[in-house]
Image: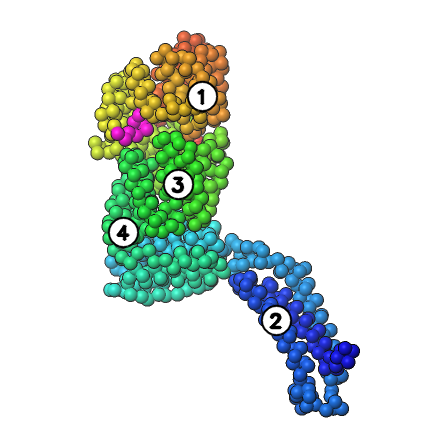
Amino acid sequence: MSSFLSELKRRNVLRVAAAYAVVAWIIIEAGSVLLPTFGASESTFQTYVIVVLIGFLISLVLAWVFEVTPEGVKLEKNVDRAESITPRTGRKFDWAIIGLLVIALGVSVTLNVTGMRDADEEPAATPLVEEERVSIAVLPFASRSTDPENQLFADGIHDDLLTRLANIGALRVISRTSVMEYRQTTKNLRQIGEELGVGTVLEGSVQRIGDNVRIQAQLIDAESDQHIWANTYDRELSTVNIFEIQSEISAEIARALRATLTNEEQLRLAKIPTDSLAAYNLYTQGRDNLYQRRLETMRKAREQFEEAIALDPDYAEPYAGLADSVLLMLNNHQAISPEEAFTVARTSLEKALELDPDLSDAYASLGLLKHQMWQQNRDSAELEEAEEHLRKALELNPNSATAYMWFASLRGTQRRIDEAIELYTDSLAVDPLGKIPYANLPGMYALRGQNEEALDLYVKAVNIHPDWPTGYQNLSNHLQGLGRFDEAVAWGLVGAELSEDPLGGAQLAAPYLEFGEFDKLLGTYSGVTPDHPWYSFGASFEKAIQLDFKGAAEVIENAMNPDSPRLLELNLIAGFSMFAGDFDKARRFAERSNPEFVADADLEIDADNVTNLVFYAYILQNLGEGQGAGPLLDKALAVVRTLPRQGISGQGIRDVQILALQGKTYDALAAFREAIDEGFRGTVLSNGWPLELDPYLVSLRDEPAFQAMVAEIDAAVEEMHQRVIEAEETGNWDALRALVETI
């Protein structure tokens, strides 16, 4: 055994082993850091280590079999022992080993002390650029064709490419609604990057030449204006080629930004959803119409989605678009019956997911569908299903601003306000210029009683989108909730002027009613034609102003679909019937609007149904069922006391009304005083009727303290009315609008 060890030493096998061990250690240490940097998997690293170990065995065999001589490398058996120079070679190995150990020490310090070894655990180390630059804004693609119709084609390609990139979880992709603000912009890329919060910008163009298409794209560092990547694609015009180009662009952008794609993402990128160019064009045009959110464009979008489906029944995306069109017509315009909207949406989404089980848009639409169904029947299981579907949508597409918004709306319904605010904020991260978050997010702050924060956000909305009527309309409504009716008129008029909707000035109806200007109130509905879904409401209000409440109820009842009425129709008929003294009819319609009031033994009261509950309790009192009304009012008061009083989401004087109905006059007067001190000036926004007609407060009307406080409110309202009259006469609204800017 000792002779064998001596021979190993003589042949320098042990020295070779030591040297190789040090070199192998350095190689393995370096590989553990460098391989993940280039996206290598764990199995690749394991193979790498095995190869190094095999090399160790080979080096030992070679050291045993061969010897280095002055004439070169020879087999050991062919070298005369007297002429062997292995001792001198051994001393060289000793110095080499010492040098390698010094290098190994340096590598160890570099990897461990500087923290490079742990870099693969930090997401920021993977991309080529800083973490904040693993974000991208895809600007609208320019059309290089002379035919104006080709801009729609270019927009469709741009929209589809955005969708594909958005499905890459390692990227933050700015949504279409924000980037479309930069069509034909004169701003430079640095400005755009700063405004959208991105580090990279993709520019592109599309040119159709006969039966061919050319798509050019270039990825640019927004801060330095340096090109990161660019390419031109010339193909025959077909859906297969269009989708392949989009897939290639997406994959090359991901590589340029060092964004790792999962296997599922790679499969989704490679998907070709249709081979019908006509169906594809109809679908992209439908999406463009849907984005505009106007009633006429939604109706057009529905037609285009249906035509796309007829051309290619196996094309999943148009089914999801069809569902969106009917659900948004219901949600935003009440222009379709719930029964029709739900039936079309449910059937379409089932088909969409049958064709493509990973279609994020379909899951988001399912979430919206279930949320709207809950609003009709208050089945808590629907909310749970809505949440499940929206989570799935965001899992598949973490850049879906729409899914974030609809999820935020769901959380708002559940009064999980902090989560709703966080989700709206997430939506703005991928859609920083999005209009809908700016329409809804301020209301969440108002629900928390943070009315100044809400006001600031409403002002920010009109500053960012000065041509958007909804921003002004929401600001007007919030000011009404704060008791600032003159300012509400000043801002509401801007929204009315900008809006193309015949009901664009409807937010002015409440302050005009507070001022007693009935002609102007009716004027807010004057542009509504008989074919408009809200036509009957204007006609009913005209009768209500004349105190013909029975006639007002009949107008709506005659116009509604008895098999699928809208909630607002049921509530208005119940309210007008109550004012007409027909409490039996009021009860019937109130119970149709809120079936849970009758069906639920353990009724759950929240901010969404508490107003109708007080109304229902009042009806029961007038029908001689005071015993049933009492517990309902107790539950309602407990909920109302958790709600803010002022602002767009304020309860107004709901607590005063409940206390008056309970016969607690002293407490009701104290609460009324508190409300006035906080800025309360009228009940139209929160109740739909002026203070002087409020039936809940009948027991207080003969109280001198109540009369004095009403006179105080009347004086304040008249002052605001006079300021509005002055502004109307001079045409100068600047002074009233400037009051908001001083907040």
Sequence-wise first label, 2 or 3: 2
Secondary element type, mark 1: helix
Give the CA separation, mark 2 to mark 3.
Answer: 53 Å
Residue 313, disc: 4
Query: How many neighbours does mark 3 have within 10 angstroms: few (below 14), some (14-19), or many (20 or more)?
Result: many
Give the CA separation, mark 1 to mark 4.
Answer: 51 Å
Is residue 692 something one can see in this rendering? no
Nearest to viewer (mark 1 / mark 2):
2
The residue shown at (31%, 32%) is 505
Sequence-wise first label, 4 or 3: 4
Q: Are marks 1 and 4 in contact (CB under 8 Å)?
A: no
Residue 367, disc: 3
User: Would residue 704 be counted in the magenta stretch?
Assistant: no
Query: How many neighbours does mark 4 have within 10 angstroms: few (below 14), some (14-19), or many (20 or more)?
Result: some
Sequence-wise first label, 1 or 3: 3
Q: Are marks 1 and 2 in contact (CB under 8 Å)?
A: no
Secondary element type, mark 2: helix
Q: Is residue 421 shown left or right of residue 580? A: right
Query: How many neighbours does mark 1 have within 10 angstroms: few (below 14), some (14-19), or many (20 or more)?
Result: many
Residue type, numbered disc 3? Gly
Give the CA separation, mark 4 to mark 2.
Answer: 56 Å
The residue shown at (31%, 44%) is 348
Is residue 591 something one can see in this rendering? yes
Q: Which residue is mark 1?
A: 636
Nearest to viewer (mark 2 / mark 3):
2
Residue 302, disc: none
Q: Are marks 2 and 3 in contact (CB under 8 Å)?
A: no
Magenta span: 563-572
The relative height of residue 451 versus residue 700 in the rendered view (above or below) is below
Sequence-wise first label, 1 or 4: 4
Residue type, numbered disc 4? Pro
